[in-house]
Image: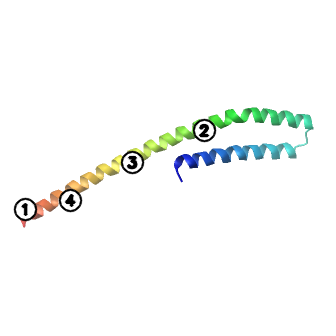
């Protein structure tokens, strides 16, 4: 599964979980129907902004993780180049001495 797919699934799960928690809370609190509708309306109005903020946060963290992975890969690649060069040098020395 790609990183973008994982992020999308997480965001959807986060939003659905928030909606379920809100509805459950409203249904279990001793409030009037008018008060519950007001809370639901405010929650529904806030969801797009919350989703956008969360999406931005996930994107920032994803970019940070991608950069960290790229740096680690570059480091590994450089170490591999050094090891290959050392191996080539060692085998040339063996051929010259033998």
Q: Secondary structure at mark 2?
A: helix
Residue for point 76% across, 35% down: 44
For disc 2, the neighbor class at 10 Å (few under 14, some 14 to 19, many from 20) is some
Disc on the earlier residue, 4 or 2 = 2
Q: Quadrant of the N terminus?
A: bottom right
Identify the image quadrant of residue 86.
Answer: bottom left
In the image, residue 66 sits, relative to residue 95, either above or below, namely: above
Mark 2, residue position: 55
For disc 1, the neighbor class at 10 Å (few under 14, some 14 to 19, many from 20) is few
The x, y position of residue 9, in whole percent, is 62, 48
Mark 4, residue position: 87
Residue for point 58% across, 46% down: 7
Disc on the earlier residue, 3 or 1 = 3
The x, y position of residue 77, in whole percent, is 32, 50
The x, y position of residue 74, in whole percent, is 35, 46
Mark 1, residue position: 96
- Colour approach in the figure: rainbow
Q: Nearer the viewer, mark 3 or mark 2?
A: 2
Residue 72: mark in rendering? 3
**Distance from Cα at disc 3 to Cα at disc 1:** 36 Å
Disc on the earlier residue, 1 or 4 = 4
């Amino acid at each position: 599964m790609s990183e973008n797919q994982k992020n999308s699934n997480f965001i959807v799960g986060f939003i659905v979980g928030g909606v379920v928690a809100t509805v459950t809370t409203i249904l279990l609190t001793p409030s009037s129907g008018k008060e519950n509708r007001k809370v639901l309306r405010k929650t529904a109005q806030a969801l797009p902004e919350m989703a956008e903020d969360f999406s931005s946060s996930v994107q920032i963290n994803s970019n940070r993780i991608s950069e960290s992975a790229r740096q680690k890969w570059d480091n590994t690649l450089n170490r591999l180049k050094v090891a290959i060069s050392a191996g080539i040098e060692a085998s040339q020395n063996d051929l010259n001495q033998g």
